[in-house]
Image (cartoon, rainbow, N blue to C red):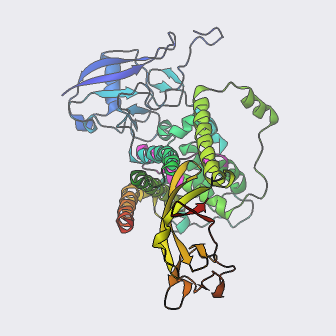
Amino acid sequence: MNGNDNPIEYRKPLKRGELDPHRTENTRIGMWAWIWQRTSALALVVLVALHLTLTYNLLIQFLLLLTVTFHAALGLRVVLLDFNLVSVKYHRALIWGLVALGAVVTLIVWFKIY
Amino acid sequence: MRRNIRVFRYDPRQAGSGHFDRYSLEVGAETTTTILDVLLRLQQEQDPTLAFRFACRVNMCGSCGMVINGKEALACKTNVSEIPAGGEITIRPLNHFPVIKDLVVDMAPFFEKYESVLPFFEPKREGTEPAQIRPDSRERLAIAGATECIACGCCVSSCTMAYYHEGYAGPAALNRAFTLLADSRDGLFAERLDRALLSCYDCRTEFNCTEVCPKGISPTRAIKYIQRLALTHPAEESLPVSPVEEVMEQIRQPLDRRAWVAGALGAGAAAVLGALGIGAVAGPALSKTPKQWVPVAPLDNLRAGDVTTAPIHYDIQRGIYTQRVSVPVLVSRTASELICFNATCPHLGCTVRWDGHSSRFRCACHGGNFDRDGEVLAGPPPRPLDRYVYKVDSGQLLVEVG
């Protein structure tokens, strides 16, 4: 108990997922999209650094291309939603749609080049 | 069917961080028993000290918002049958609000944020009365069900940004602002927009609020609408600036660990990228590539009167990586002299070839022609072909590159 006049003490606000056995099921697709875009941004920092040092390493080139596409697909989704070019009710379909489209384009481009 | 129930308990007289109590209850008809019914029975039959808030019991008042099995919902709207058969039911108070007791939270922060966007209707001074907005008009359809908000706080509880961005008004308040901003009768448009725009960019488009809203409203959609208003209504005056005292207070606050880690990560990434970028761009220009002698061919293989194309291979250091260079050298040998031409066209860098029929060096790209001494005969090249410095060492022709 604290020393002020208030005889009771509020518990500090719970954070999302704190003491929550259902934390992962509470993380739904829209939030995963955001988390994965952030994560892929960090991965890009590493991959771009590697790409600068090992420019002609095919594996790094491929991973970089893949990560850029993934990051761009999720970013494009947010742009489309921001400008109301696609209704927010399709936000789930946009995630799978754009990531799949990006993957197909990436593979076509990759096999055209190599 | 018998259900195990875990309920978060917090006793304000004992403080601490709270814990879960386990109960077991025989629930009869699960499709017609709500979580609120379960809580009422627990309170009446097992533990009279259990505290929770409710009023209308029919999804209208927004008092009984809580986190049920990881998802924010109204206890009176969630049936026991919605939780997988036989599964445990876990009930927690809403996130991001101080907990008063057990499942009862202090909603004061919610309504402070709510008030920050002027959540009341103020008619315009001029205009015809009564205003006529047809139910099927574009304006009314855009607002749609967003006016149905009952301020239960589920969206704010689900929104991680409401936690991490202290000044963020949150989904409920911004949804309320949207319903008024989209209303052509609104007399406080500019003031409200100023306030809503201040915080609407804290949204990260996670859709958590949309997922949990018991009224099926999408605050995300509302926030996007407000963000787009900034495009059509550019601020006429600069946005209000925080008083100096507030800014100073923020500076004085010790840096918390999360901010420090984020800052350190960002600075580290920026440093790595910056160093690599500078190294890659400036490195080759700054570092003097050491000159080196590269063997071209044995002198005996080069017959007088011929122009021979001989490939050379050597490594150069470009910044932090090693590049293997393979280029042709054009060796023109006459009875009296020997010239080693650089095959790179001085125009735009294509590779020049020797054409024996016309006795000319030709560049295929833009039609540059050079004579046997490398002088320009035709085309755009600005100067004669470059020559390598060469030497002959024990019968081997070498050129200097670098």
Observer-nearest residue: B118 or A69? A69
- Residue A77 position, x and y percent, is 47, 58
- Which image quarter holds the C terminus of chain B? bottom right
- Residue in view at x 64 percent, y 41 percent: B115
For the record, the magenta segment spans B198-222
Asked whether residue B295 appears in the rendered view, the answer is: yes
- Residue in view at x 54 percent, y 44 percent: B172
Give the image quarter of residue B64: top left
Residue B209 forms part of the magenta stretch: yes
Say left or right for B348 vs B303.
right
Observer-nearest residue: A34 or B374? B374
- Residue in view at x 58 percent, y 84 percent: B366
Say how many tags the image has.
0
Residue B217 forms part of the magenta stretch: yes
- Residue B275 position, x and y percent, is 63, 44
Vertical arrangement, residue B63 with respect to residue B323, above or below: above
Give the image quarter of residue B31: top left
